[in-house]
Image: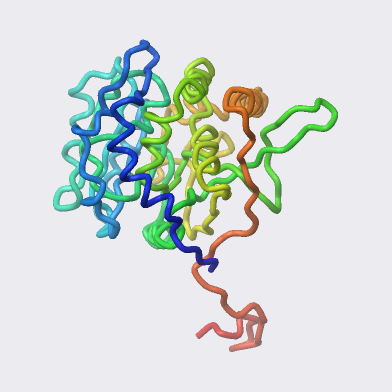
């Protein structure tokens, strides 16, 4: 596993937040400065825990509430999770429908349902006073990660505080025929980690939502106009700060129930799960084109192309690859 020391810039940033946050503000889609950037309303960065993380899980579809409850319970039960915050972005769903989430996870990490102050996808990266850890896991409401894989991802982040760590990777590339940036998938490299599930340092929430002045405000406006691409912009933000790409982790049991390639009937405990394919943005045929448009707009708006390629992925361990004949069967030689 590659090891890097935490850059001094990351430590220095915590001091700068207190100085700069009073001047830098998040502008929501209503045009109002967001109060969550006020330093006096946020925890002292020096008190944030590094041995646990906070899960920020986006929720929108009422049809997914049974699945969301199951996922929330799983996260809440993990010893390295300090809190689970469900960021609910659908104002049309009545509060009584969300009560099923409040009753989940008894005895585990606390679960809170926070109605988003705006319908903007940028709101999933708002700094929040409820976050008391140095790392956050940002994830969707239709992705299941097994405990061992999540623990491995958190461990990888613990040795690479300046990187985004996750399970779902994509790439940018240059379309030479069109002379423009494009969004794609490469078999051997990646430069973008998706918010299906990513772990990153809490300080990047501040940088995304409260920093960057007019250029970042314009970039966030692209997210609002497209109703997409907040994950790509966060990858821009982190890469601009570190000059490094994300890190992909090989998971043991990582399920994306929102993928339109799932067969009908896929769901929790083999029960049909409705509303999955209809909600996912990836179901739209122009998905890649729209994401490519975002990359081009972020490049134009921010005046830089910071995305960097990473190669390979982190796995739990390297075992024996050779096959031996045991009990009349070919098995891995180190199999017991």
Above-or-below relation of 253 to 126: below
Image coords of residue 245 (percent x, y): 58, 49
Residue at 60% of width from left, 85% of height from top? 333
Q: Quadrant of residue 124?
A: top left
Tally of numbered discs: 0
Asked whether residue 195 is in view, the answer is yes
Q: Which of the pair 150/189 is nearer the observer?
A: 189
Image coords of residue 285 (percent x, y): 65, 24
Residue at 34% of width from left, 49% of height from top? 135
Q: Is residue 43 left or right of residue 32?
A: left
Query: Which residue, as the protein is rendered here, is positioned at the far left?
Result: 107
Q: Which of the pair 209/190 is nearer the observer?
A: 209
Q: Which of the pair 229/324 is nearer the observer?
A: 229
Image coords of residue 211 (percent x, y): 41, 30
Query: Which residue, as the protein is rendered here, is positioned at the far top?
Result: 30
Residue at 28% of width from left, 37% of height from top? 18
Q: Which of the pair 49/91 is nearer the observer?
A: 49
Image coords of residue 232 (percent x, y): 54, 34
How was this image coloured?
rainbow
Asked whether residue 264 is in view, the answer is no
Residue at 65% of width from left, 41% of height from top? 171
Above-or-below relation of 1 to 231: below
Q: Is residue 233 left or right of residue 82?
A: right
Above-or-below relation of 63 to 224: below
């Amino acid at each position: 596993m590659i090891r890097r020391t935490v850059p001094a810039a990351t430590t220095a940033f915590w001091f700068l937040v207190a100085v700069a946050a009073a001047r830098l503000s998040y502008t929501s889609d209503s045009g109002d400065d967001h109060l969550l950037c006020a330093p006096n309303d946020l925890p002292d960065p020096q008190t944030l825990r590094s041995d646990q993380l906070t899960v920020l899980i986006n929720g929108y579809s009422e049809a997914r509430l049974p699945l969301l409850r199951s996922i929330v319970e799983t996260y809440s039960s993990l010893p390295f999770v300090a809190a689970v915050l469900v960021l609910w972005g659908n104002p049309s769903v009545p509060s009584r429908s969300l009560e099923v989430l409040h009753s989940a996870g008894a005895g585990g990490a606390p679960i809170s349902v926070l109605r988003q102050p705006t319908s903007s996808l940028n709101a999933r990266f708002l700094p929040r006073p409820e976050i008391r850890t140095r790392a956050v896991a940002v994830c969707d409401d239709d992705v299941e990660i097994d405990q061992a894989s999540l623990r491995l991802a958190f461990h990888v982040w613990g040795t690479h505080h300046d990187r985004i760590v996750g399970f779902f990777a994509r790439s940018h590339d240059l379309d030479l025929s069109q002379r423009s940036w494009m969004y794609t998938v490469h078999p051997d490299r990646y430069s973008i980690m998706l918010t299906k599930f990513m772990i990153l340092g809490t300080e990047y929430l501040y940088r995304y939502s409260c920093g960057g002045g007019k250029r970042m405000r314009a970039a966030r406006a692209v997210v609002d106009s497209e109703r997409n691409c907040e994950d790509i912009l966060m990858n821009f933000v982190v890469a601009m700060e570190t000059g490094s790409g994300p890190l992909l982790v090989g998971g043991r049991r990582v399920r994306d129930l929102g993928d339109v390639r799932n067969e009908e009937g896929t769901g929790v405990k083999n029960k049909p799960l409705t509303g999955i394919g209809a909600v996912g943005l990836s179901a739209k045929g122009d998905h890649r084109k729209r994401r490519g448009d975002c990359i081009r707009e972020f490049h134009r708006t921010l005046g830089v192309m910071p995305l960097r390629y990473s190669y390979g992925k982190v796995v739990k361990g390297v075992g024996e690859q050779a096959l031996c004949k045991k009990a009349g069967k070919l098995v891995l030689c180190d199999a017991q």
